[in-house]
């Protein structure tokens, strides 16, 4: 316990220092401010206010009830599961669930909004005032992960709109209402983020959380989770300035890229003496730029009005008694599973993994599962296992563009490989090569492949000595330099040794032998 | 004239059982009446096919399966803003002129499920916005009490249903009530109009005007019918989240209701500027009536009554702006031909599809909902709404509480069309809805009950209001008022006779004369069939008498024969004894005795003979008499039958004339 | 028949004689309205009018339409002065009832034909709409085309 507290404190001070390092990425005078709004589709059978099927795909305009098509005279009836999932999310994000919440109409005209308004919760949402805590760490950009949190202003239930396909050639839109009325949960965050990477990390964390809660599939590529980013920049010390909104970013990296681009764009405008217009922009993932979405001078007024067809929604904050129309919040709290932050802390505490390793493992649920299975037996070194999974396995999969979820290699194969590596029977490079082979021929076992390709490390002392002697003989200059005192040359010599032996020597034995020989 | 306007559901069902009427014949009569009164323009669409199908179903249930439903064969009219599957539902607007819903409104399906028969969809102000049924693309609806040259409005916006009920085209009508739209036409047409508690009757399928105030309304000619209809439609509906979840207990009339336990409040604020003397007089007389029935009547105060109309106009316009946002022509409804941008298509569609009233309400509503105006107008209106609702709360539940409130329904009798249309729709609603609107604001039930006719022969009504879910008490008190008054209102309704051409008038006169001769009260097909059946039964009675007499005759004849035979035998005996006597040796001693004896015997025989003869005289029915009476009876019967056939011919002539008149009028128009 | 009519007349007059107590419970003078008698007329500026027109899409921005709107606003202004301090808005008369919750089951939908039945314009089971809300640079190209079209038509 004490150790974990100590490490936490250390981490905290480290983060503070580290953050300053990141901010100095931009000119000191400008400070960027980012606030996110995330829409997540709730994973329910039927829609928010109608009994039509809530599904991705499906025959055009067939998963549509009369209410979803805004046929006159139809009325909304709230789906209980949506409330439960909403409350679950709110509790997992330490929000205050409101005992009474209500629904409002948000009016605007659009082809995929048949009623001319969306039913949402603006005035009295389901929950308020929570926070999400996460680690910011992008390999290649950050040296080490740091803590970040973003406050949640409110969480609300609302309807999704239909889909319109733009037919530029025939100058029309084709409207499919299958998605109209699908349940969404909107999470509105305060503008307390600073850049695209922080935003991306938040989104990643959020995806993990909703997946673990079973609230949402988190598949951004399917549109199950969509991010809007509000970006503005200001001089340090100034109040918040005009912001632009980037709508419907559909991937985690897209979030980082879009925000990054927008910050730079705004900065260059301001530095050239211009000013920022409050507008809505879209992220063009191919061109990697943000482009404006709506007319410049348009002022929108949503004319929020309470939804008269829905009396107030009440939840039971106090007892675990579940009623037909009043769900028990404490009962739902009991359903919260282990969340990512807890998993990371556990990994660090139990296995003494480095924070960035923990972050990366938790970010890939499949790899985390592999890790936990492999680690269970035989006291295998956790860091090494983690490294194998993250650096070697993941690299191979990424190169071959295989999604981790569909990893063809089994746990058993990985266990075998790990043991071989840890027993020093093979080198790391060989390990990687073996993984590559396994991906192509999954029916083989690692040991078979290694034996077949003759990849076992040579541990025979005589053999090693022979090779060492050869290197010494072939590189007199370097040997002389070493003997004169340039110890760094040793590494070069080892390098030559491993190269000439095609990396087949057990280097730990070899280096010892080499040292011995050089002493002569 | 008007059996159709006086039969209640109970009486109709009785005549079904007595086979004086059948569901199909009754439905036919109602459809006929609907067509006859086309001039009043109560119906947008007369659904005779549906009506016939429903009637046939009812007939099957009543006569064949012997399992009848509470509304079997009862005709209804539905206001055309209730969705009816596969039947056009237009809201009297160009926007929905060709809209055919694919589902039924809950109210409609519950009625049909109880056996009702749909006569047609009735006229309304466009999208129920109005209080006169004058703003409809199908033209205005005329008041059946005054529908000629200088005609009067029927009230609105459920004018069509009210007129249909008043003229007998249907037994009950369904309307909607947002600010008085059911009670107002009920009052102006002289029928009963109920606005139930908000949430008692499902709104699923009712195309909304103001969602937080709309309720389906019921129009009938009497309280008993109203209760039957209400019991069929009230109760929670899972498709409408704004229905009250409590199970609905059917309402019944309490026979010996103790009126002395009931407190009636009269709110002083309901006498507003412009209320007519007639209306005030009716208000007073009903207050007196109730006091005479031992109710406690007192004055109460609802201080915020006068602001209700302005609050209503704000909330109404805001909700309208929101509810009408869905009409863009994409999924249903009118679609303009502009197609280069969504905005242009929507704007054209909505301008073509909506009339001025609808468009201006949308425009104003959006103004009040702008973020900068939201607190100032919309929120303010909602706060004032609470004050109005609290007024009612205090009066019903506070100190010195009352059970019901008694107020007028409208401020005057039915106005002339030309006077009514001289004012703008908003101002007109403001004026007409003064007394009815507050009940919608608070969601409480209210009923309009016709009391009597005015000097101009137009109906006058009063309104009762009660706390939430107090329909049972309210309807019982209304029933009490109704029975105490024996309101003659609808009986005096006289639709369409006077304007017939002269020839028809002559025929009618002749018919009237024979009518009085034959002692028939009313000249309509129902009475004629009644009369005919009476004749048939009389004829049968006569024939029965004749048969009885014949039988008697036969019996007597048999008796006579028997007596004759016995007489013959007696005579034979006498002869034989006489002969035996002459053959016998006369004994001088007992000859005298013997002669005496014989004489005695003879006298007794002669006595017997005399007796028998007299008996015979008494017994024998003069044959000449019997056949003659029979003949005269038969001839008189034949004469009656001839008269009956001639009358029937005359009746046919009259109906022909009526049809001729109709076509003449139609052509004239 | 004569008897019947006599009786009915008697009945009516009996009622009349019973009633006329001239109840004093019904008010004898009309009540003073709480509304403000005269309110200042608001003149709306063109920005507001065009905003409203864009939000309503009903072509009411004619002179007559604006006048009707101004009348409505004046009508509404009559009650703004009434004190509503510490009064909560009444959003629905069912505010003390809990919102009904429905079980998460598929009970509706699967009625493509019904959904499309009343649509005037369809394309292979899709609803058809004109283009709208597309990124600005595309719109600019569009509007150029449009102006060309309009010019041609002229």
Image: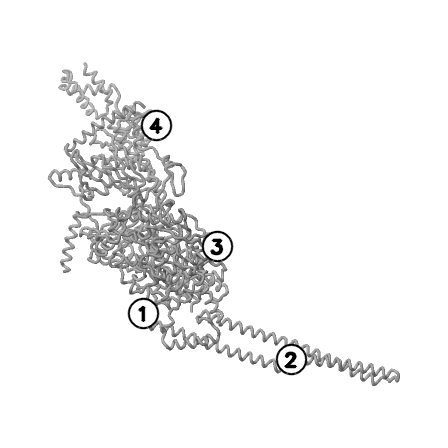
Between B33 and C95, the residue placed more toward the observer is C95
Q: On the image, numbered disc 1 is attached to which residue?
A: B149
Q: Residue at x 83, y 85 (%)?
A: B582
Q: Chain of mark 2?
A: B
Q: Does the rendering let one see residue B383? A: yes
Q: On the image, numbered disc 2 is attached to which residue?
A: B621
Between C43 and C80, the residue placed more toward the observer is C80
Identify the element where label 2 is drawn: loop
Q: Position of residue A47 (x, y in %)?
A: 33, 46
Between B394 and A131, the residue placed more toward the observer is B394
Query: Which label was assigned to residue A128?
Result: none
Mark 1 or mark 3: name the one nearer the start of the chain: 1
Mark-to-mark CA distance, 1 and 4: 98 Å
Q: Chain of mark 3?
A: B
Identify the element where label 3 is drawn: loop
Query: Which label was assigned to residue A376?
Result: 4
**Residues marked 2 and 4, same chain:** no
- Is A464 rendered above or below residue B72? above
- Is A230 rendered above or below residue A164? above
């Amino acid at each position: 316990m004490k150790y974990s507290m100590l490490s936490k404190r250390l981490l905290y001070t480290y983060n503070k220092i580290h953050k300053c390092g990141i901010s100095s990425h931009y000119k000191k005078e400008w400070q960027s401010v980012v606030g996110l709004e995330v829409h997540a589709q709730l994973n329910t059978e039927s829609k928010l206010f109608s009994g039509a099927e809530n599904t991705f795909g499906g025959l055009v305009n067939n998963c549509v009830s009369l209410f979803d098509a805004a046929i006159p005279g139809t009325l909304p009836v709230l789906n209980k599961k949506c409330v439960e999932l909403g409350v679950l999310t709110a509790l997992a994000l330490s929000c205050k669930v409101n005992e009474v919440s209500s629904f409002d109409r948000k009016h605007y005209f659009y082809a995929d909004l048949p009623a001319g308004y969306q039913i949402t919760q603006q005035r009295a949402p389901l929950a308020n005032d929570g926070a999400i805590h996460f680690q910011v760490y992008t390999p290649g950009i950050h040296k080490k992960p740091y803590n970040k949190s973003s406050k949640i202003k409110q969480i609300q239930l609302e309807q999704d709109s239909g889909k319109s396909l733009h037919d530029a050639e025939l100058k029309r839109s084709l409207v499919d209402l299958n998605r109209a009325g699908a349940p969404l949960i909107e999470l509105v965050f305060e503008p307390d983020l600073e850049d695209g990477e922080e935003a991306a990390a938040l989104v990643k964390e959020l995806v993990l959380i909703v997946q673990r809660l079973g609230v949402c599939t988190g598949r951004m590529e399917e549109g199950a989770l969509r991010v809007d980013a509000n970006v503005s920049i200001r001089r340090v010390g100034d109040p918040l300035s005009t912001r632009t909104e980037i709508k419907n970013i559909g991937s985690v990296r897209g979030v980082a890229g879009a925000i990054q681009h927008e910050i730079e764009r705004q900065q260059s405008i301001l530095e050239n003496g211009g000013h920022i217009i409050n507008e809505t922009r879209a992220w063009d993932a191919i061109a990697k730029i943000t482009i404006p979405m709506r007319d410049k001078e348009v002022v929108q007024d949503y004319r929020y009005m309470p939804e008269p067809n829905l009396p107030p929604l009440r939840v039971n904050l106090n007892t675990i008694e579940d009623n037909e129309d009043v769900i028990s919040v404490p009962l739902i709290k009991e359903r919260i599973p282990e969340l990512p932050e807890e998993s990371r802390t556990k990994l660090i505490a139990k296995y003494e993994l480095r924070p960035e390793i923990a972050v990366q493992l938790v970010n890939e649920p499949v790899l985390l599962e592999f890790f936990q299975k492999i680690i269970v037996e035989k006291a295998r070194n956790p860091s090494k296992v983690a490294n194998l999974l993250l650096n070697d396995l993941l690299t191979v999969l990424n190169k071959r563009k295989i999604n981790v979820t569909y990893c063809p290699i089994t746990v058993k194969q990985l266990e075998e490989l790990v043991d071989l590596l840890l027993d020093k029977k093979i080198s790391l490079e060989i390990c990687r090569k073996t993984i590559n082979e396994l991906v192509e021929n999954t029916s083989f076992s690692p040991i078979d492949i290694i034996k077949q390709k003759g990849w076992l490390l040579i541990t025979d002392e005589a053999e090693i000595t022979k090779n060492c002697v050869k290197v010494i003989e072939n590189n007199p200059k370097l040997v002389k330099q070493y003997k004169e005192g340039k110890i760094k040359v040793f590494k070069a010599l080892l390098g030559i040794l491993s190269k000439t032996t095609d990396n087949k020597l057990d280097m730990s034995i070899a280096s010892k032998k080499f040292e011995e020989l050089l002493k002569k | 004239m008007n059996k159709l306007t006086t039969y209640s559901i109970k009486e109709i069902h009785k005549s079904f059982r007595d086979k004086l009427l059948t569901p199909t014949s009754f439905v036919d009569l109602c459809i006929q009446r609907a067509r006859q009164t086309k001039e009043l323009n109560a119906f947008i669409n007369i659904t005779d096919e549906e009506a016939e199908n429903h009637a046939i179903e009812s007939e099957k249930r009543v006569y064949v399966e012997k399992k009848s439903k509470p509304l079997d064969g009862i005709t209804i009219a539905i206001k055309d803003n209730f969705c009816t599957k596969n039947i056009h539902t237009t809201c009297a607007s160009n926007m929905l002129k060709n809209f055919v819903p694919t589902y039924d409104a809950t109210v409609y399906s519950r009625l049909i499920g109880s056996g009702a028969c749909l006569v047609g969809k009735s006229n309304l102000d466009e999208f129920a916005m109005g209080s006169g049924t004058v703003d409809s693309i199908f033209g205005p609806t005329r008041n059946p009490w005054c529908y000629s040259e200088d005609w009067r409005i029927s009230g609105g916006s459920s004018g069509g249903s009210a007129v249909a009920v008043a003229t007998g085209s249907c037994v009950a009508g369904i309307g909607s009530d947002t600010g008085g739209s059911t009670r107002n036409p009920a009052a102006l047409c002289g029928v009963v109009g109920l606005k139930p508690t908000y949430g008692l009757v499902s709104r699923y399928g009712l195309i909304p005007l103001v969602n937080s105030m709309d309720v389906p309304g019921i129009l009938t000619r009497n309280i008993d019918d109203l209760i039957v209809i209400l019991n069929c439609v009230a109760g929670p509906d899972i498709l409408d989240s704004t229905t009250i979840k409590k199970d609905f207990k059917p309402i019944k009339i309490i026979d010996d209701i103790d009126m002395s336990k009931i407190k009636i409040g009269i709110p002083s604020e309901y006498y507003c500027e412009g209320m007519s003397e007639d209306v005030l007089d009716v208000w007073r007389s009903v207050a007196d009536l109730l006091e005479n029935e031992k109710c406690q009547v007192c004055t109460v105060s609802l201080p915020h009554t006068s602001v209700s109309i302005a609050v209503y106009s704000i909330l109404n316009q805001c909700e309208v702006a929101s509810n009408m946002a869905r009409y863009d022509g994409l999924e249903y409804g009118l679609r303009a031909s502009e197609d280069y941008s969504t905005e242009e298509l929507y704007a054209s569609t909505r301008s073509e599809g909506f009339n001025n009233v609808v468009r201006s309400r949308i425009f104003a509503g959006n103004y009040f909902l702008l973020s900068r105006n939201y607190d100032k107008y919309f929120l303010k209106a909602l706060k004032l709404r609470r004050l109005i609702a609290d007024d009612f709360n205090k009066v019903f539940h506070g100190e010195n509480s009352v059970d019901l409130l008694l107020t007028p329904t409208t401020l005057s009798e039915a106005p002339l069309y030309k006077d009514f249309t001289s004012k703008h729709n908003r101002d007109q609603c403001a004026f007409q809805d003064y007394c009815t609107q507050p009940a919608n604001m608070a969601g409480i039930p209210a009923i309009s009950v016709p009391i009597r006719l005015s000097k101009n022969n137009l109906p006058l009504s009063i309104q009762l209001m009660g706390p939430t879910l107090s329909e049972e008490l309210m309807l019982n008190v209304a029933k009490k008022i109704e029975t105490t008054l024996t309101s003659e209102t609808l009986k005096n309704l006289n639709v369409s006779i006077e304007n017939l051409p002269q020839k028809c008038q002559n025929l009618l006169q002749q018919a009237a004369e024979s009518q009085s001769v034959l002692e028939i009260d009313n000249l309509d097909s129902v009475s004629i069939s009644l009369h005919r059946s009476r004749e048939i039964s009389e004829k049968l009675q006569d024939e029965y008498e004749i048969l009885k007499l014949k039988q008697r005759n036969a019996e007597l004849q048999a008796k006579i024969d028997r007596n004759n035979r016995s007489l013959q035998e007696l005579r034979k005996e006498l002869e034989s004894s006489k002969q035996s006597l002459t053959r016998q040796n006369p004994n001088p001693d007992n000859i005298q005795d013997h002669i005496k004896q014989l004489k005695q015997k003879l006298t007794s025989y002669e006595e017997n003979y005399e007796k028998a003869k007299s008996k015979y005289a008494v017994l024998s029915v003069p044959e000449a008499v019997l056949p003659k009476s029979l003949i005269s009876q038969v001839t008189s019967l034949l004469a009656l039958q001839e008269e009956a056939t001639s009358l029937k011919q005359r009746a046919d002539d009259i109906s022909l004339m009526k049809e001729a008149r109709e076509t003449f009028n139609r052509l004239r128009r | 028949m004569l008897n019947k009519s006599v009786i009915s007349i008697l009945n009516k007059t009996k009622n009349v004689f019973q009633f006329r107590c001239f109840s004093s419970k019904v008010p004898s003078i009309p009540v003073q309205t709480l509304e403000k008698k005269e309110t200042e007329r608001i003149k709306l500026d063109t920005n507001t009018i065009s905003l409203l027109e864009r939000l309503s899409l009903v072509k009411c921005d004619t002179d007559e339409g604006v006048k009707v709107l101004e009348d409505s606003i004046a009508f509404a202004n009559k009650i703004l002065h009434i004190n509503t301090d510490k009064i909560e808005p009444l959003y629905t008369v069912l505010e003390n009832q809990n919102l009904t919750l429905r079980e998460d089951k598929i009970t509706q939908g699967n009625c493509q034909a019904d959904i499309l039945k009343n649509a005037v314009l369809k394309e292979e089971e899709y609803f058809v709409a004109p283009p709208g809300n597309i990124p600005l640079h595309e719109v600019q190209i569009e509007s150029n085309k449009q102006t060309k079209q309009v010019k041609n038509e002229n």
